[in-house]
Amino acid sequence: MEFKLSKEQELIQKTAKEYAEKAIEPLVNQIEDENRVPDEVIEGLRELGLLCLPVEEKYGGAGAGFEGFVVGLEQLARVSGGVGIFVSVVMLGTSTIAVHGTEEQKEKYLTGTCKGSWIPSVAMTEPDGADPRMLKTTAKKDGDHFILNGTKRFITNTNFAGPMVVFAKDADTGRINGYIVDKFCEGYSISEPWDKLGSKGAFLSDVYLKDVKVPVSNMLGTPDEGFQTLKVTMAMGKIGLSAIYLGNILAAYDEAFNYSKDRIYLGKPISQFESVRNSIVDIAMKYEAAKLMTYRIGYLADNTANKAKLVKDSAMTKIFVTETAVDVSRIAMNVFGSYGLMKDYKMSRIYRDAIVGPQIEGTANLLKTVVATDMYK
Amino acid sequence: MDLRLSKEEELIQKAARDFADKMIVPIAELIDQDNHIPEEIFEALGDLEMFGIPFPEAYGGGEAGYLSYILAIEELAKACAGIAVVISVNSVGLSVINAFGTEEQKKKYMPECMTGKKIFSFAFTEPGTGSDPKQLSCTVTKAGDSYILNGNKRFITNAGFQGPMVVIAKDSETDKASAFVIDKFCEGYSLSEQWNKIGAHGGPLYDVYFDNVKIPEGNVLGRSGEGLWVLKVAMIYGKIGLSGLFLGTAKAAYEEALAYAKQKTHRGQPIGAKFQHIQISIADMAMKYNACRWSAYNLGFTADTVKDPNQLLREAALTKVFVSETAVEICKIAMGVHGSYGLMKDYKIARLWGDVIIGPQVEGTSPLLKILAAGIILGD
Ligand SMILES: Cc1cc2nc3c(=O)[nH]c(=O)nc-3n(C[C@H](O)[C@H](O)[C@H](O)COP(=O)(O)OP(=O)(O)OC[C@H]3O[C@@H](n4cnc5c(N)ncnc54)[C@H](O)[C@@H]3O)c2cc1C
Ligand SMILES: Cc1cc2nc3c(=O)[nH]c(=O)nc-3n(C[C@H](O)[C@H](O)[C@H](O)COP(=O)(O)OP(=O)(O)OC[C@H]3O[C@@H](n4cnc5c(N)ncnc54)[C@H](O)[C@@H]3O)c2cc1C
């Protein structure tokens, strides 16, 4: 066992950290207020290879694997939770296509994302819920096309051009499959963005698909592979979320640690109080545990041929890291006293961001039922 | 032991609840967005005698005790934390005038602050200190039969409303702290921009600047040099209000989650009926709310019956820590029941998430209050 980052991973970590501090940090308030990742940040991420870390080099990606991906995303999300979600969903789209796509699909959509100007989305959730058995969106075969109809809820990155992997039910067979839709094609429209509590910046809206025509060649995998595609997407999403909220924990840790040294009380920094030191150590311990779990799931993803097998481990990691992020936020908030409540302090944003993790990509309780099913099967 | 509410307590609770449902709930979202409470609300609350519940009838109060006060704050806070913050801090001012004021001061300040037209502030916190009176940097200097006040106060609630303000400041000669009553917006009084805080919107928060504010000698509150006693009593009554307030937030989160669990369906069945983990969440919230409720009500009862300030401070500190920390836990569970919808501004639980974290951070952080209470317990 070796608990060391490779030279390449260290470089990714350093590049992501420096870029986030230099180019994203100054724009964080703008990202929050406009609820949009600025074009120059997207271009910057693309140029440095941070937008497409796990995508193979032959499609223009960094070929850094998932371990490289989580290490990089942690540093980006440490500065902006919104940018974290944005990049994570790009990974989700590209990975789903990378695992199940044909060579032609990969060539077109992966390269278009890594080298071109596209930003992918993945659309699973619907107004009835995120449970695949409840899908109402339908795909109806019509000659060499499918006709898609339905409404998708809470979908990220819908405002950018690029591929959207839409999960829908075959109107004839009832089977679920993924279909690659080009956003803004005829019949594609989106709602106003949702106004969410935290992790702002990643654009979130509902999507309306009205008689959207998709060539048969844009179906992902074979018709009976749909459920496997879905499992891969679910696992990948959780790997992304683990890295984002690991970054959130690190941000809370930085903030609380620095504040405890800067805030002077009775002529000495509050870090001299035992109660404050206890809090800082609690945060540090929780960060280490969350980091080990997150880096491990990256390692597992790189060393598991059948990615659908990652569902259980990725769910456990996601539950642990996102719940820990909420705990850490609370402890860090306490170090700040009342100042942490004010918008002027980063801490208030970190707290609002933290609660997003447990609520998306399956709530903790729901995911525990998934894990239990796997354990008892 | 009789754990039933008296007729009077039930009446006050019902009056507050009805008012909240009818008048506050419909505009609570707007208050949150605009960070502003319409003046009519305060006047209506004044007419309903919500500002003076525990104070003597002789000065316009209801003389109904602190348990009744907590019951009312709970109901109002359930609808809107900002409104409850305003009333709670107003009551801190009234409590210290009631405890330390001369007959003249009581007559002057108490009745007007029970109408909703004038609203009290209490100014202790400064940029350099939130918890430690020894660090005070606001000073008064004696000049003839007046004092001249200079310095800055931080995070002061209600500072933008007309009415009196109790200020804790140090005498530049004796170095001892005293309490003074001033009229807000007198000469030399000015305000910062409003702080943009994470929750309890509508409850306005400012820094206050005193530039040679002239205070007549008759406006010293309590004995000169004994400002820390005034502060101690303010800390007690502040925590009573906050216990009621975050009890209300906890109740609101619980009720939101309960309603959501009944209404949201999964393949035709309400999630509350279908999933055991939702049922367990509901039970956890109900248990925790009950524990908070009895803890807060007991504090009200204690405030009405116990005279020893150290005992009362200990109870108030521990109750505030317990209720405010548990309220955060309840909100977290309620969030879980809501899935992603809970994150959207369209749902009340998103607002409550910003409100609830204020509890453990104000009037002393939880670790600090535990240390304080432990000191009293170990010293017993
Ligand atoms: C910022 C953000 C970004 C998002 N991005 C995307 C995206 O890009 N693509 C996408 O498809 N979705 C996305 N989502 C949607 C998100 O993944 C889902 O909303 C989430 O998985 C929860 O679904 P829900 O809100 O419908 O909750 P529900 O599924 O309605 O859950 C409500 C409650 O019921 C329980 N429950 C539900 N089903 C079960 C079950 N089968 N067993 C036991 N308990 C159950 C849950 O635990 C929860 O307590 C995003 C959401 C947000 C907020
Ligand atoms: C909504 C709101 C309304 C408010 N209203 C008012 C008001 O009307 N009037 C008013 O005067 N104030 C008011 N305040 C201020 C508030 O009461 C103080 O800010 C609060 O008590 C905490 O002080 P602080 O932020 O300076 O934290 P600090 O006291 O600086 O605490 C920072 C950290 O240091 C720790 N710490 C500090 N001292 C010690 C110690 N001795 N031992 C161990 N640990 C220690 C704390 O636990 C905490 O972790 C309000 C604040 C808010 C947010």
Image (spheres, coloured by chain):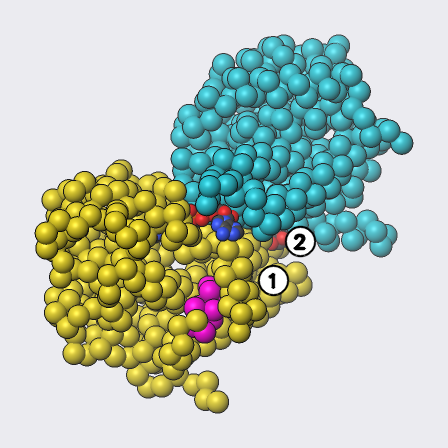
Chain colours: A cyan, B yellow
The answer to whether the residue bearing label 2 lies less than 8 angstroms from the nearest atom of ligand 1 is yes
In depth, the one of B260 and A316 nearer the eye is A316
Residue B362 x, y percent position in the rendering: 42, 53
Give the quarter the ligand 1 occupies: top right
The residue sitting at 52% across, 43% down in the picture is A270
Identify the subunit bearing mark 2: A
Q: Where residue A47 is drawn, which disc sits there?
A: none
Compared to residue A365, the image places residue B298 above or below, namely below
Question: For residue A176: magenta?
Answer: no
The total of numbered circles placed on residues is 2
In depth, the one of A194 and B293 nearer the eye is B293
Compared to residue B363, the image places residue A113 above or below, namely above
The residue sitting at 53% across, 59% down in the picture is B371
Question: For residue B315: magenta?
Answer: yes
Q: Badge 1 local density, few (<14 within 10 Å), some, or many (20+)?
A: many
The residue sitting at 81% across, 49% down in the picture is A374
Residue B136 x, y percent position in the rendering: 34, 48
Residue A36 x, y percent position in the rendering: 46, 26
Residue placed furthest toward the right? A1
Q: Where residue B281 is drawn, which disc sits there?
A: 1
Residue B320 x, y percent position in the rendering: 46, 64
- Which residue, given by chain and number where applicable, does mark 2 sit on? A365
> In the image, B136: left or right of A306?
left
Residue type at mark 1: give it. Answer: Ser
Q: Secondary structure at mark 1?
A: helix
Residue type at mark 2: give it. Answer: Asn
- Please provide the residue range marked out in magenta: B311-323
Q: Secondary structure at mark 2?
A: helix
What secondary structure do most residues of the magenta stretch adopt?
helix
| For the residues bearing labels 2 and 1, Cβ distance under 8 angstroms | yes
